[in-house]
Amino acid sequence: MNFRTALCGIFWLGVAMAPAVVHGQAASDNPSVTAQLDAVKPLVTKIKKDATTMQSFSLAAGPSWTSHAAALTRMKDDVNKLQESTRGLQSHRTVASAWQQDAIDRVTALANDLASNMNAAIDHLNKSKTRPTAPPYPEYLKENTRLATALGDEINAVIDAGEAKAKEEALSKQLD
């Protein structure tokens, strides 16, 4: 048995015997921030799905103004829930780790942009009931899809980064 094989065996034994790492939680991270980000993922997925559906509404003569309005209202309700969640994240910002604070800022900025764009889409739709797909309405819908996608990607990246940081800390402790 060579030294490299023995060292790898000892390393993997140490990892296997290490205490379990909390999902996506490094020691310096705030567990509430991680939990809130995990909790908001299904809502963001729903918003993204609705945004994609709404974007398809603008591609053809398609649904009536009332169908657009109903879909936007459902989406707005979800975006409002998302805004509540970002306020919860913001309330934990001062006790979050430095990288979590940056993540909270990025997620909040995207959520705010999405809310502003949603309001612009609703305002435009309310002003052009006879022509619900007239410009710039399709651009608003496209931007909603882009923002919801970016928000989902950002949340996933933050959660993945937290998990990687937690694993790194656990492995580092094993090497010490």
Image (spheres, rainbow, N blue to C red):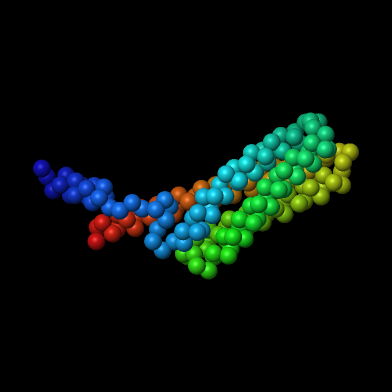
Q: How many marks?
A: 0
Relative to 148, 70 lies left or right: right
| Residue 77 at x, y percent in the picture | 71, 48
| Residue 144 at x, y percent in the picture | 68, 46
Residue at the extreme left of the image, as rendered = 1
Residue at the (46%, 59%) spot, across then down:
31
Quarter of the rendering occupied by the N terminus: top left
Residue closer to the observer: 160 or 138: 160
Residue at the extreme right of the image, as rendered = 130
Residue at the (54%, 65%) spot, across then down:
93
Residue 60 figure quarter: top right
- The relative height of residue 110 versus residue 134 in the rendered view (above or below) is below
- The relative height of residue 68 versus residue 76 in the rendered view (above or below) is above
Relative to 128, 37 lies left or right: left
Residue at the (87%, 41%) spot, across then down:
129
Residue at the (76%, 36%) spot, across then down:
58
Whether residue 26 is visible here, answered yes or no, is yes
Residue 131 figure quarter: top right
| Residue 76 at x, y percent in the picture | 72, 48
Residue closer to the observer: 44 or 139: 44
Quarter of the rendering occupied by the C terminus: bottom left
Whether residue 114 is visible here, answered yes or no, is no
Residue closer to the observer: 61 or 159: 159
| Residue 150 at x, y percent in the picture | 59, 48
